[in-house]
Image: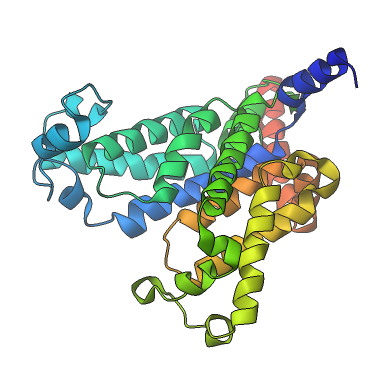
Amino acid sequence: MTLSGLWQGWCNFWFKPTGTASICVYRILFGLLVLQVSIVHLGGHFEEWYGPHSMVPLQTVVNHFWYNEPRFDYFLLFPQTDHTFALLYVAFVIAGLFLCLGLFSNYSAAFVWLTLLSMHHQNPYNINGGDAFLRTVAPFLALSYCGDKYSLDALIAKKLGRPIPLERRPWAQRLIQVSIALVYWQTFWCKMAGPQWLDGTAVYYATRLDDMMRFPAPFISDNMFLLRCLDYFTLIIEFLAWNAIFIKSVRYYILVGLVGLHLGIDYLINLPVFEWAFIFTLVTFVEPVDVSRFLQSAKLEGFFSRRTRCATRIKNRHDAV
């Protein structure tokens, strides 16, 4: 392969137009995660973590986390009252709902990102890996064409007679893919740095974290042979997840393995949002044509298409009048 061929492949990876079905479905799933964080985890307790009466005073955070250096926190632009933070919480929930519906998709994703960033800087002690990952990929979602399909934005555009291209440059979606690949790269090499994963005992120790276990599974946790198999399977699938996953011919096999890995962890260990944040992000690796084919088989593609045709007919009648 020549240097020009490598350069062309690089440019095609980032900028060759492709369908937007994958990133648009990811927008919906991302919105569901935002709603889970905001309603299930923070609902009724937002003021305990953020605001003038939070359990960790802001000045403590500034001294021990900000190190008296600048940090982004748009919460500080508003009056520091309970009423203000109640409105900010409601706005966060609405933004998550708008992502699911595809209304002002890019602006909603940008607002969610800025809110997650402000929440992290306002109280860095109320966070987990899933929250951190959502905060990492949210700006790329905001820069993508995530509202082109399966959205109210698309229906409004059709009604106003604004054509939406069938294919777009996927560079923002690629940044999301690279982000999750880098996570697997980091986790793989961290595992390789210690002896437990190499000698096959790491999963055994993980299943002994009684305070974090969700459902008992003695047929797994008491079977050393099976635990060793899961240990080495994790190493293999995480190794493939940051390199071979970009090879189209083997990608879906790797995706199945990764989904199985995350579902298994989610069943055994209570890690809110974390596993589903990764499972949902893997959707961005699915070819848009396959996403559309799946939605058609599930009768969901027709659901959106019927509403698009309905909006078009309404516009035509309006123009005729």
276 or 229, which lies in front? Answer: 229
The picture places residue 191, in percent across and down from the top left corner, at 54, 54
Q: Is residue 41 above or below residue 74?
A: below
242 or 59, which lies in front? Answer: 242
Q: Is residue 307 visible?
A: no
Left or right: 14 with respect to 58? right
Which image quarter: residue 164? Answer: top right
Q: How is the image coloured?
A: rainbow
The residue lying at 57 percent from left, 31 percent from top is 153
The residue lying at 73 percent from left, 44 percent from top is 245
Which image quarter: residue 23? Answer: top right
Quadrant that contains the C terminus:
top right
Left or right: 240 with respect to 198? right
Which image quarter: residue 78? Answer: top left
The residue lying at 27 percent from left, 50 percent from top is 126
Q: Is residue 269 above or below residue 315?
A: below
The picture places residue 27, in percent across and down from the top left corner, at 56, 41
Number of labelled discs? Answer: 0
Left or right: 266 with respect to 161? left
Q: Is residue 60 visible?
A: yes
The residue lying at 63 percent from left, 39 percent from top is 24
Name, please, the residue furthest toward the right. 1
176 or 300, which lies in front? Answer: 176
Quadrant that contains the N terminus:
top right
The picture places residue 107, in percent across and down from the top left corner, at 46, 27
Left or right: 219 with respect to 170? left
Q: Is residue 81 above or below residue 18?
A: below
